[in-house]
Image (cartoon, rainbow, N blue to C red):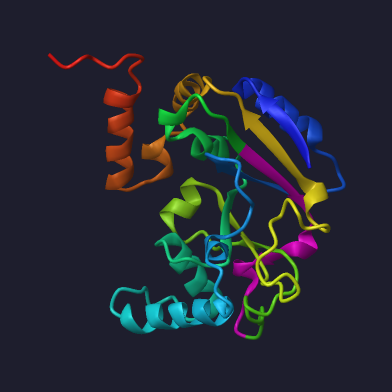
Amino acid sequence: MNSIEIKSIDQFIRDIVALKNDEFDFFIFRGQRINAPLVPSIARYHHQDITNIEKRMLLDLKRRGKLLLPNTVSEEWELLILAQHYGLKTRLLDWSSNPLVALYFAIRDIDDSETPSFVYLFRGYNDQVIDKDEITATTSLGSPFEIEELKVLRPSLNNERIIAQSGWFTVHPYSEENCGFVPMQMDEEVKVNVTEFTIIPGLKRELMDHLNMLGFNAQTLFPELAGLCHYLNWEHLYQKNELVERC
């Protein structure tokens, strides 16, 4: 896996453009505060029967949340996307087709500005993509629990947050051979198409200022009241270079 340092937004964009060629059909990006394996959140729980546990969690969500779920949630893939959106541990991993969205998520918590953060680029092909908008009454994608290799899920644009964040997902298969989910950095079929960008320590505050100027902030990426409040905290408190000492 290649690794590139990010020293400025313009250099970051230039490096991405330099990686683009006709061989690949799409680029997606993911920002992370720490150098952690590229696996979904369910992978952090090492239960032997994790696939069946995930299925039961989704079934319980559908049953217990019947009055809270939209009427449009009628099949497994849509329920999985909704569950991921609201924080259920699933085999989906969040990505964005916009590199600046990923950069924002890598540095949105700038309290740890003396440690590096990371943006990951995955380059892929159309035969890896599952497109929710291509599902019809006569089309079946099969079950997300039966895939045997990494897939990329392009969701329907029916959610304000997905639209604002240009959201995509990777769908990760459970490996019986490895008794778990294989990180993308270790998957022989995938890792050659993953590039790691490292944000050098001490640069996050400056990059966050530049992202805000370009329109990437909590208010625009979380189009709800919580996003506005997060943005106001940053604008009035976290953005300050020095903390005022208590009297």
Q: Kindly tell me whether residue 25 is visible in this rendering.
A: no
The percent position of residue 112, horizontal first and vertical second, equals 45, 30
243, above or below 57, in the image: above
Q: Kindly tell me whether residue 191 is visible in this rendering.
A: yes
Looking at this view, is 11 or 93 the one in front? 93
As drawn, is 53 to the left or to the right of 129? left
State the quadrant of the C terminus. top left
Q: Quadrant of residue 83?
A: bottom left
Direction right: furthest residue: 23
Numbered marks: total: 0
The percent position of residue 175, horizontal first and vertical second, equals 71, 72
The magenta segment: 119-137
Q: Residue at x 83, y 58 (%)?
A: 189
Asked if residue 121 is among those painted magenta in the image, a careful observer would answer: yes
Q: Quadrant of residue 108?
A: top left
As drawn, is 136 to the left or to the right of 202? right
State the quadrant of the N terminus. top right
210, above or below 181, in the image: above
Direction left: furthest residue: 247
Looking at this view, is 103 or 215 the one in front? 103
Q: Residue at x 50, y 24 (%)?
A: 114
Looking at this view, is 54 or 98 the one in front? 54
The percent position of residue 227, horizontal first and vertical second, equals 33, 43
Q: Residue at x 72, y 64 (%)?
A: 150
Asked if residue 36 is among those painted magenta in the image, a careful observer would answer: no
As drawn, is 100 to the left or to the right of 234? right
The percent position of residue 198, horizontal first and vertical second, equals 64, 31
Q: Quadrant of residue 239?
A: top left
